Amino acid sequence: MSKLVEFYYDFGSPAAYLAWTQLPDICAEYGGVLQYKPILLGGVFQISGNQTPVNIPAKRKWLFDDLTRYAELYDVPFKVNPHFIVNTLGLMRGAMWAWDNGCIEPYNKAMFEAMWVEELPMEEPAAILDVLVRAGLDGQAALEAVQTPEIKSALIEATSAAAARGVFGVPTIFVGGAMHFGQDRLDWVRRALDHAQEPA
């Protein structure tokens, strides 16, 4: 079984944020290779016919209570962004730029924490630029790149490919061809990686 861990995510998902806080350590413990797969969650919803669970008020309340409990369990900071739901099109196009420029890890850290720790209004270009500059990234280059046809096409293609693979939401994690949906399924990621270490 492969030790490749493919992590499909969108910065607008608090569950994806929590998964992101755990996956590097899980991969380090079990010898997994983490591959980031940024996609546009809204695009996946449109293709798959899915929708956000927060559209149901009772489920929204339960969801954020549950995520808060998981954050406490993981001992990581987490705050409900008052600007949620956030249009993450610019952020996810930026992830395509970051991937191309070899800075996807610091970019992920900057964006996830801006959304779910700092509670920033991440639809605003000024806020995005400030976050990028504070992270030591070329914010102006990123903002210019996300308007190019190449970056726009890259995100569309990544999102379409994810949906074609069966992705209907985030976080979605593939290990050895098996799909695991939700940050509360990380034990299955551990199990898959553990089995991958066993001799054939």
Image (cartoon, helix red, strand yellow):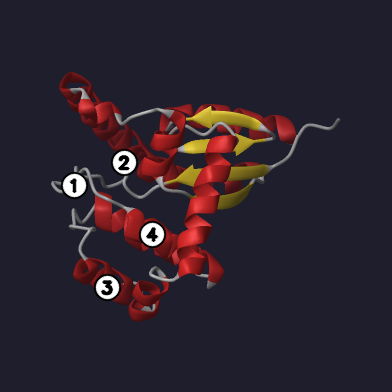
What separation in Å lies between label 4 and label 2 (alpha carbons)?
A: 13 Å
Identify which amino acid the numbered label 1 is placed on. Asn
What separation in Å lies between label 1 and label 4 (alpha carbons)?
A: 16 Å
What separation in Å lies between label 2 and label 3 (alpha carbons)?
A: 21 Å
1 and 3 marks in contact (CB < 8 Å): no
Q: Nearer the viewer, residue 198 or 57?
A: 57
Residue 54's spot in the image, x, y percent? Answer: 23, 29
Label 1 packing within 10 angstroms: few (<14), some (14-19), many (20+): some
- Looking at the image, residue 69 lies above or below residue 120: above
> What residue is shown with label 2?
14
Q: Nearer the viewer, residue 18 or 153?
A: 153
2 and 1 marks in contact (CB < 8 Å): yes
> What residue is shown with label 4?
109
Q: Is residue 62 left or right of residue 141?
A: left
User: Is residue 164 visible to the viewer in this orientation of the structure?
Assistant: yes
- Which of the marked residues, 4 or 2, is nearer the chain's N terminus? 2
> What residue is shown with label 3?
129
